[in-house]
Image (tube, coloured by chain):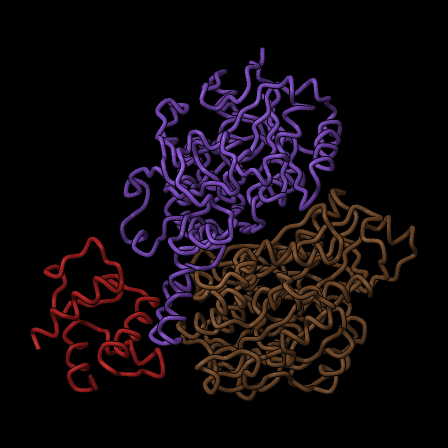
Amino acid sequence: MAELREELKEKLIEQLSLEDVEVSEIGDNDPLFGDGLGLDSIDALELIVLLEKDYGIKLKDPKEGKAIFESISVMADYISKHRTK
Amino acid sequence: MNKGIAITGMGIISSIGNTVEENFDALKSVSHGISRIEMLKTRHSEEIMVGEIKKTNNDLEKVLGLKPLHTFSRTAMIGTIAAKEALQNAQISDVNEYRTGFVSGTSVGGMDTTEKYYLEYAEREENRRFIQAQHAGFTTLSISNYLGINGYVSTISTACSSAANAIMLGARMIQAGKIDRMVVGGTDALSKFTINGFGTLMILSDAECTPFDDNRKGLNLGEAAAYLVLESDAIVKKENKKVLGRVAGWANANDAYHQTASSSDGEGAYLAMRKALKVADMTAKNIDYVNAHGTATPNNDLSEGVAMTRIFGEENTPVFSSTKAFTGHTLAAAGSVEAVYSLLSLRENLIFPNLNFKTKMKEFSLVPQTELVAKEVNTILSNSFGFGGNCSTLIFTK
Amino acid sequence: MSDCFINGIASISAQPTTDPDTFLEDIISHKEAIFRSHDPNYKEYIKPAAMRRMSKSVKMGVTTASMALNNSGVEMPDAIITGTGMGCKQDSEKFLENILNNDEQFLTPTLFIQSTHNTVGGQVALGLGCKAYNVTYVQGAASFETSVMDAQLMLSEESEINILVGGIDEIAKNSTLLHKLDGQIKEDDIDVIKLLDSDTPGTVASEGATFMVLGAETDKSLAKVINVETISEGTPLEIKASIEKFILNQGLSVEDIDAVVLGNNGDVGYDNYYNNLQSSIFSDKEQLCYKHLIGDFHVASSFGFWIGCKIFETNQVPAILKVNDISAKKYNNILLYNQYLGKNHSIALLQRC
């Protein structure tokens, strides 16, 4: 699981062009949206595509993303339970 | 009240008809143009509904009598068809008799040809003539050349408010005496680019769209072109021209909130409506009907609805409807498509319905007009909003 | 017609043009047919959080907009008008390629959102929190001029306002190469400084942005925009007649013009539009060209406005711009003319203020 969390942090930085952010700066339980990493609704859509492309998880409604993308830990939990690849 | 600029001609092609009168017949008989996509190959064809013009590019070429090896994209062809009808409708045979300009709105220009040939340009020479045709400005020049207009020609590309801004520019230039006559409007053909683009935003509905409904799931894309002929009062008087209506108010404001989403208080839309009323020298009470932008995305309809309650008061909002459920969201053309429908409303004293509405939204008590209804209509306010926070409002009068 | 003054201007181009204290003193010699702009440090102008999704044209546009506003002392403009020939081509191209190469799957929204022509105008508004009028013109080589015309019209409707007007175009890897395929760009690389002597078809391509603040006269005014006109198509003879008529319409005669800034781009197919003027009505004028320095792109002609302002400011003309031996005695009226492939002609007249 720790490995998946690291992997997600790297993917986040790359996919969302967070050029000035280091993997070590993202805490496992830091909120990704709002006060935490400061991601926005466009980032949420990017992450939905990331779930589908890299882990074979397809979300129908963008609203579902809100709970899943709460933090790296929550995301990693969700992915490990639902991944198809 | 601002007397406004005379509209002496209109032309349109959309999924509900190839001419103004065909569009009117469909509106009057409440017959929408939303279907599965057939003219364009996309892997999403089973997931989306669109407002598609059921003519192949070959059909369109024949209508216009284009020669082989022409450089018209689908966007340019439907644009030419509509602009030509507008000039005929205004009974103009010699476009250069007066200082005449052309302003067209488009979002993707000739993207429909680009996406068809892009990967083979390197190997095959025959289609390279379409490389330039991708550009929005090239689309506009294709149309203006066909019409014989070669003075002031420009293209406005402010996403889904483009045509509304083109109409506004034409009215301003005539009002300032810079030009005598303007053909203004917009054109956009369906393309994989826009289908997939709106797809990534997850705002495409898999069923017929339901503007202002609490359970709305998103928009249906559409393709269309529509143009108006605006003329100075001097020409109208001299030629004893029939006036279809007037553009009496116009405004453009920016939401400056988010790149694509509208603010929850509808600030940009509110500012645009308020400024347009001021230009028209009217108050909110003067408006008989609002042709809303109403795309049926959760975000737009909420933001626009809130802005309307701020302008009119929640209890005093005039009768309103979105005609997007007839045509789909025709992007850059939406402002001129709805301008034509507004002129038909003024002519016929009819309000065209907001189809597919069932449940009132939770956030306010606004309910759109859901049936075709006869009502005396003298002033119409029409909204068009686009990416980049662009909000435009036009006011039409009899 | 109300008065329209340039009260601030800034330009990013393939030359170092962002230092307000220099005027083409150090010239970069480009040797390719496609070359990039000379960039300032964008981080000084744009916050990292805002920058992460910005393509080149957005960075260039937001930066020059901010420089021009600074230059003019205006904090919040009353309108933002942008012109671009191709829009945000880089993101547009990437999104298109993803659609075609991945069979319409796994697409993400950022590229699409950034692909619209009005992205720069929207981003400038968002950065400033500017809720005013905001429009984008896309008319090939006349994109910048049609934007200036709208601003001028707006100043005639309401005189006490400040309008931010800009032009932006960027190189995109594959789409720009397509312009080589269809002959718009020269087939072989070239010593760009010698572009105007070339005897081959096509030109050289680059990128850049120019923003100006237009408004009523202030103590910062750099030039007065007397008028701007665009003509979508015409023959060299028709264009010459239009230019003569344009000058007369401003209450001036050809004699009143001190220098002309022309858009020659080394394309043997179309430079005759300029040559025809250079050997006739402009034969006794100081003639200046700039595309052998900054390349050609749809809003390259905005650089002519920058040159005009610099000449009024410094009363000097860098020798590298001059294409004939005539030197004007004074610089009061400078005429700009540009076209591309015989289309989207623009004429503008700048006056010292």
- Tell me the shade of chain A: red
Vertical order, B311 against B3 (above or below): below
User: Which sits in the foreground, A85 or B386?
Assistant: A85
Give the residue at x 56% y 44%: C141
- Tell me the shade of chain B: brown
| Quarter in which the C terminus of chain A is drawn | bottom left
Vertical order, B301 against C136 (above or below): below
User: Which sits in the foreground, C266 or C172?
Assistant: C266
Question: Horizontally, is B153 left or right of C288 in the view?
Answer: right
Dividing the picture into quadrants, the one containing residue B33 is: bottom right
Question: Horizontally, is C186 left or right of B275 in the view?
Answer: left
- Tell me the shade of chain C: purple
Q: Position of residue A77 (x, y in %)?
A: 15, 81
Q: Position of residue B32 (x, y in %)?
A: 65, 84
Question: Horizontally, is B288 left or right of C22 in the view?
Answer: right
Give the residue at x 36% y 34%: C30
Identity of the residue furthest to the top in this view: C329
Give the residue at x 52% y 58%: B131
